[in-house]
């Protein structure tokens, strides 16, 4: 069978690495030899310029290794202007000539070397770059604000367009992403479809019901400002006055000091738990025993945690932040409120906590939706079809 490339962001935790692992497994199961190619930005020391210089002097431009149990080619992330960031992946050299290629990313830029080389590839993309950066800037991310004002910003937009337009097939990770791409580039509509993240509905399944005392659950990369955790803490503080036994569990990352400080300021030290990273086996139990999944995000390409919650029969309260709008049916599997509307979020949270029968019905409807739309068997079939259409007998 064939060698295959997966160009992606740095493997690890989070939504995009989960997509990369999905494609990697798909290619292995099809008999191919895949390799992940990524820009190793997280490896560069940030303690001092001298530490960074020593790192680059000692690190080859591209090196093979195992990353998250996947064969990988890590490309050194040299300090170059923004318009050259994704050109660095061309240091992967002949590895980019593999007959089967996929680009799996938040925004599309990592596919730039394949687009420039006119190589065929399937693009599985979560969001548009300006949507991501606008939401980061709105949350106070100064870096995102500077980048959108930088002279390299038009080049980055042009690179994204090039990768979109040269993809053989574009898989939007959510209905919202697919809609945005079609609106921005109508000429690619014929090669555009939606493929959600596959959830293992045998692992993420119905449990025995909410725990006593009850708790709300958020699991996310909470150090990302787009997750809007501080709004959730303020809403929870107001609701807890009516439900004094209610707790809030916020898992996924260790919280930022400012987040802990706000929880203390709001008097929530005894009722908010930050367990950090939670392995999948324990995460399932958190979903199964929660009363409600809460997502206060400013922007989501999809929201994998929303899919997992629904598969476990957990109703969802989410802002209209992109991805969840195409997953959560308002009033049926959960409730959607206006983006960054703390008053509406608080009010809906309070109303739902008073309606246990409604919550139970929403949870069961969410489980049914998971089995019908994004169980692993369905999504993997869609991915196999996409690769077979793109690469024919090679796949």
Image (tube, helix red, strand yellow):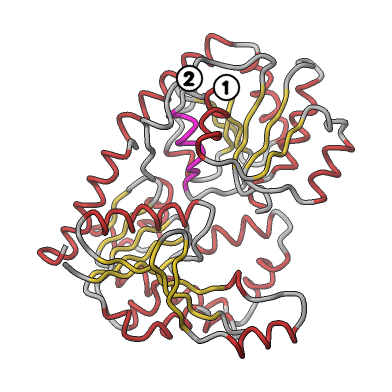
Q: Position of residue 247 (x, y in %)?
A: 72, 24
105 magenta-colored: no
Q: Real-space Cα distance between discs 1 and 2?
A: 7 Å
Label total for image: 2
For the point 33% across and 29% down, which residue is it?
371
The residue drawn where x is 71% and y is 27% is 346
Split into 4 quadrants, where in the image is the C terminus? bottom left
Residue 102, image x, y percentages: 32, 65
Residue 380 at x, y = what percent? 27, 46
Q: Residues within 10 Å of mark 2 (few under 14, many from 20)?
A: some
The answer to whether residue 111 is left or right of residue 169 is right
Q: Nearer the viewer, residue 381 or 300?
A: 381
Q: Which residue is mark 2?
A: 207
The main secondary structure of the magenta stretch is helix
The residue identified by callout 1 is 289
Give the extent of the magenta segment. 302-311
Q: Are marks 1 and 2 in contact (CB under 8 Å)?
A: yes
Residue 150 image position (x, y, % from top left)? 64, 78
Residue sitting nearer the eye, 194 or 102: 102
| Quadrant in which the N terminus is drawn | bottom left
Earlier in the chain: of badge 1 and badge 2, it is 2
Pick out the residue farthest to the top: 357
Residue drawn at (48%, 79%), measured in percent from left and top? 75
Q: What crowding class fits label 1: few (fewer than 14 Cα within 10 Å), some (14-19), or many (20 or more)?
A: many
Q: Residue at x 32, y 80 (%)?
A: 95
Of helix, strand and loop, which one carries label 2? loop
Q: Is residue 171 above or below residue 272?
A: below
Left or right of residue 323: residue 2: left
Helix, strand or loop for disc 1: helix
Identify whether 262 is placed above or below 72.
Answer: above
The numbered dot on residue 231 is none
Residue 232 as seen in the image, left or right of residue 165: right
């Amino acid at each position: 069978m064939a060698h295959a490339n997966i160009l992606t962001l740095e493997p690890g935790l989070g939504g995009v690495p989960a997509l990369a692992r999905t494609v990697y497994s798909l290619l292995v199961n099809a008999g191919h030899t895949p390799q992940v190619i990524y820009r190793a930005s997280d490896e560069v020391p940030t303690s001092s310029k001298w530490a960074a210089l020593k790192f680059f002097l000692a690190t080859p431009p591209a090196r093979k290794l195992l990353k998250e149990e996947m064969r990988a080619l890590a490309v050194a992330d040299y300090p170059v202007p923004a318009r050259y960031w994704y050109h660095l992946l061309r240091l992967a050299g002949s590895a980019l000539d593999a007959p089967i290629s996929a680009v799996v990313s938040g925004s599309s830029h990592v596919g730039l070397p394949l687009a420039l080389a006119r190589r065929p590839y399937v693009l599985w993309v979560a969001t548009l770059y300006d949507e991501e950066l606008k939401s980061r800037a709105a949350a106070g991310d100064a870096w995102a604000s500077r980048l959108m004002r930088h002279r390299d910003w038009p080049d980055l937009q042009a690179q994204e367009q090039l990768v979109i337009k040269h993809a053989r097939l574009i898989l939007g990770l959510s209905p919202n992403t697919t809609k945005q791409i079609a609106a921005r580039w109508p000429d690619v509509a014929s090669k555009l479809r939606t493929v959600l993240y596959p959830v293992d509905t045998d692992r993420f399944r119905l449990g025995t019901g909410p725990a006593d005392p009850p708790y709300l659950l958020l699991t996310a990369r909470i150090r990302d400002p787009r997750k809007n955790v501080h709004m959730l803490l303020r809403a929870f503080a107001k609701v807890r006055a009516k439900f004094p036994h209610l707790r809030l569990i916020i898992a996924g990352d260790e919280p930022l000091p400012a987040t802990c400080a706000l929880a203390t300021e709001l008097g929530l030290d005894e009722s908010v738990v930050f367990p950090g990273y939670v392995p999948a086996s324990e995460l399932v139990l958190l979903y199964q025993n929660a009363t409600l999944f809460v997502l206060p995000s400013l922007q989501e390409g999809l929201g994998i945690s929303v899919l997992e919650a629904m598969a476990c029969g957990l109703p969802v309260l989410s802002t209209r932040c992109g991805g969840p709008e195409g997953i959560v049916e308002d009033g049926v599997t959960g409730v959607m409120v206006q983006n960054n509307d703390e008053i509406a979020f608080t009010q809906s949270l309070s109303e739902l906590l008073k309606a246990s029968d409604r919550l139970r019905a929403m949870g069961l409807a969410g489980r049914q939706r998971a089995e019908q739309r994004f169980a692993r068997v369905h999504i993997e079939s869609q991915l196999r079809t996409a690769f077979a259409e793109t690469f024919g007998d090679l796949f």
